[in-house]
Image (spheres, rainbow, N blue to C red):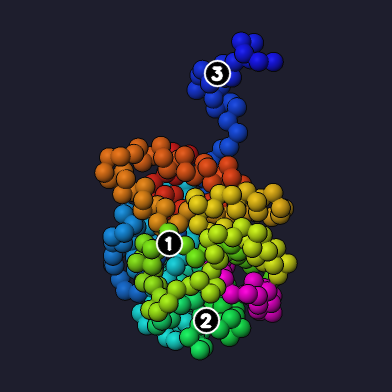
Amino acid sequence: MTFPITRLRRLRKTVVTRNMIRETKLAKEDLIMPLFVRPGKNIKNPINSMPGNYQLSVDLLVEKCKELYSKGVQSVLLFGIPEHKDEHGLVACEHDGIVQQATKAIKEAVPNLFVIADICNCEYTTHGHCGTIIDGDVDNDSTLVTLAKQSVSLAEAGVDMVAPSDMMDGRVGAIRDALDENGFQNMPIMAYSAKYASAFYGPFRDAAESAPQFGNRATYQMDPANSNEALREVELDIVEGADIVMVKPALSYLDVIRRVKDNFNVPIAAYNVSGEFSMVKAAAEKGWIDENRITLEILTSIKRAGADIIISYHTQDIIEQL
């Protein structure tokens, strides 16, 4: 039937009916808050390009986690800034590495908070790339060894999930094998499966002090023009043992999220990355947008596209509205 018998505005008339027929619902459980931890005590270094976010020492990170958990945040994703770096990122594998320290402290203070550790080398290498450099480029297979060691070390420290973000071929399989061999068969892997070589990562590189010292990451992160390739990457990660697959960034890749959702029966995460976050903050500061409304709209769009899990720096600002 058509107008005037059919009037779609009838169900938009009241808040009750709008809520009743809402197709996509955003919940606290959908969101993960990324956090940055560094050595020292009582340190709270503002990240200028990411308003409201900080590099925190372990003691203040624990306080932040208590605050987030009290507001309803159920999961955090940890990134570490070490005191020293090396050529291979081996510092990330140490028993007393910065994320290992943070994990133990969080688990003691907020045991029910779900802690995810990012698995990569870019924050831990002197050159800022995601693995061992041989002949001017990241060597895939030697990097797998470091990533596997890092994953086991963090599992031993008590993380609830590991999240490899490096984009090396075969890293999910290498990490799964290493975890299983060391008694961590039940440790889930959330793989950054379709991670693009994006300009939206700029503020994160300030936060994690991980900008590459030469070249770029185009030889291992994906070309933003490709979506068929993303499906191949996701499929390979699933075959190798990924429990959750991720698309990163989110907003310019909603079509990729949708394609992954339509093609694979696995949980899907999407990373609402630093550049996406900072653009909203900058526009809100100028008075050009309503920050709360646009944040909810953005997060809802990511969920609507097919993401089950959303990693977002907006989490701490928006969680109490859900």
Left or right of residue 169: residue 54: left
- Residue 222 at x, y percent in the picture: 55, 66
The residue beneath circle 3 is 9
The residue beneath circle 2 is 138
Q: Tell which circle, 2 or 1, labels the residue nearer the N-terminal end.
A: 2
Name the residue nearer the viewer: 179 or 294.
294
Question: From the viewer's perspective, is residue 197 above or below residue 283?
Answer: below
Q: Secondary structure at mark 2?
A: strand
Task: Write down the region rendered in magenta.
Answer: 162-184
- What is the C-alpha distance between the residues marked 2 and 1? 20 Å
- Residue 165 at x, y percent in the picture: 54, 68
Q: Tell which circle, 3 or 1, labels the residue nearer the N-terminal end.
A: 3
- What is the C-alpha distance between the residues marked 2 and 3? 56 Å
The residue beneath circle 1 is 199
Tell me which amino acid carries mark 3. Answer: Arg
Say if mark 3 contacts mark 1, CB within 8 Å.
no
Name the residue nearer the viewer: 232 or 54.
232
Tell me which amino acid carries mark 2. Answer: Val
- Residue 275 at x, y percent in the picture: 40, 56
